Image: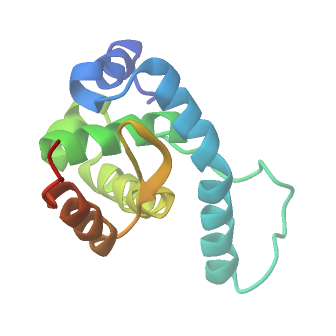
Amino acid sequence: MDVTSSARAALSHHALSGTSRQHRAELVAELVPAWEAQQESALRERRGGDRRREAGADPKHRLVFVDRVPATLAHLRHDLPYSALAALLGVDRSMLSAAIRQVRPLLAARGFAVPDQPGIRLRTIEDVNARQASWLKPRAGP
């Protein structure tokens, strides 16, 4: 069963994902190589070596990466239960849980942008605390 277009549209809405369509597309494009490398590494470890079949011969994911990112964003933004998101997407709860477990570290490694300061990314809680401390410093008045 594939994710329905109405489920995809709901998850892609700004109110659930917190991102614009363009930003989400850029985010997916940025994260795909890291996710594919992560998947291949996990498969290599499970197999105990290199592929024995051609690339693409494996079973297809029921929840493709393009749907995993907005599902993860919706979960993180609204703390939606896995069971609710899984029902919306028409997949098993454990499948959604695994998908979110795979995407969260990719988002964390990418870091979070600081509004109005391009190029700055907060990757750890220490980064957030340091940035917050600088925001809270009293500024010299005129």
- Whether residue 104 sits left or right of residue 49 in the image: it is left
Q: Is residue 65 at least partly visible in the picture?
A: yes
Residue drawn where x is 36% and y is 22% of the image: 12
Q: Which of 93/23 is in front?
A: 23
Quadrant of the image containing the C terminus: top left
Question: From what the image shows, is residue 84 above or below residue 32?
Answer: above
Q: Is residue 80 at least partly visible in the picture?
A: no
Residue drawn where x is 44% and y is 60% of the image: 102
Residue drawn where x is 44% and y is 34% of the image: 67
- Whether residue 43 sits left or right of residue 123 in the image: it is right
Question: From what the image shows, is residue 100 above or below residue 73?
Answer: below
User: Where's residue 4, x and y in %?
Assistant: 39, 19
User: Where's residue 104, x and y in %?
Assistant: 38, 58
User: Where's residue 59, x and y in %?
Assistant: 63, 49
User: Where's residue 130, x and y in %?
Assistant: 27, 69
Question: From what the image shows, is residue 116 above or below residue 33?
Answer: above
**Quarter of the figure with residue 37:** bottom right
Q: Which color scheme is applied?
A: rainbow
Extreme-bottom residue of the structure: 48
Quadrant of the image containing the N terminus: top left
Residue drawn where x is 14% and y is 46% of the image: 141
